[in-house]
Amino acid sequence: MSDEDVISEGERVTKISIFTLVTLGTLMIVIGFLSGSVALKGSGVDTLGDALGSVIVLIGLKILRKPPDRRFQYGYYKVETLVSMLGAIILILIGIWIFYVSLQSFLSPKELGYPWATLAISLFSSVCFFLLAIYKRRAAERTNLLSLKTDSLASVTSGMAASIVFVSLGFSYLGIYHADAIAGMIMAGLTIAMAYTAIKESSLTLLDVCTCSGVRGNLREIAESVDGVKEVREVLLRKSGPYVLGEMRIAVDGAISVHQAHEIVEEIERLAKKRVPSLKRLTVKIEPKEKKR
């Protein structure tokens, strides 16, 4: 995928996500107020928070379109990772708020109204969230966008939360009024846990941590297969937004010409970008292979 294709697909998926989340969140909040369900209201607020996170992702994707300049000489790709972290922080704040409201409801439980409407919207929302999560996850795998992956995790959380709300509403209408508040607290915990995972991954990426074991192995194998390469001494990788940047040190016969060395480097780069589509840049340093005495 080209940069333009990656960003365009990310924007398209994010716009669909925003429309879906705003619609579902609004319905859940309205019915939550009418019925008095704190879990449904909390789920609605959480959904609108996800929509806000999607808006931030969309803004980040638009920034990715900017070409490298004198200040950002490697481009704006890490903005996408920063945006992912901001979205996760918003989710944590929403989770804390939901937990507080749910705790207040637990201390003062009450009977809920509009049973069929609340059950229907919670079940419908749960199905929509899981379908949206699958859609965004597949798009994240195609584009390698961390912000889209984080967004898909948020949808999974919302789907699980809506499912818990559905079950808790059933218990509430059977006379177990504390079930609604307990569901709200569980939902808050899930939201905070998912957001923590996303913040951890984003932080590691911003600190240039890149396990990328499969990519590293592929690059080493590619270099070793090129004629003229005597040894692959080092492969260093780091993530930059949806892309991987790499550095490699290889050893070649010290007697070859500059032109031959250049051809070896070009062949490594060509094969590497063919096998690893997410590889944005690979810098290859050539060193002479020392003769054994």
Image (cartoon, grey):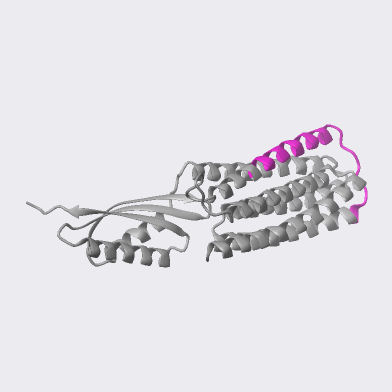
Magenta stretch, residue numbers: 88-116
Where residue 171 sits in the image (x, y, percent)? 83, 48
Point out the residue furthest to the left here.
293
Left or right relative to 219: residue 125: right
Left or right relative to 13: residue 36: right
Point out the residue furthest to the front here.
70
Majority secondary structure of magenta residues: helix
Left or right relative to 195: residue 19: right
The answer to whether residue 203 of the structure is visible from this angle is yes
Name the one closer to the observer, 135 or 208.
Answer: 208
Instruction: Please name the residue shown 51% across and 49% down the image.
Output: 69
Name the one closer to the observer, 40 or 236.
Answer: 236
Q: Total marks drawn?
A: 0
Instruction: Please name the residue shown 42% across and 67% down the image.
Output: 274
Q: State whether residue 210 is above or below residue 257.
A: above
Instruction: Please name the residue shown 67% across and 48% down the image.
Output: 56
Where residue 97 sits in the image (x, y, percent)? 75, 36
Where residue 268 sits in the image (x, y, percent)? 33, 63
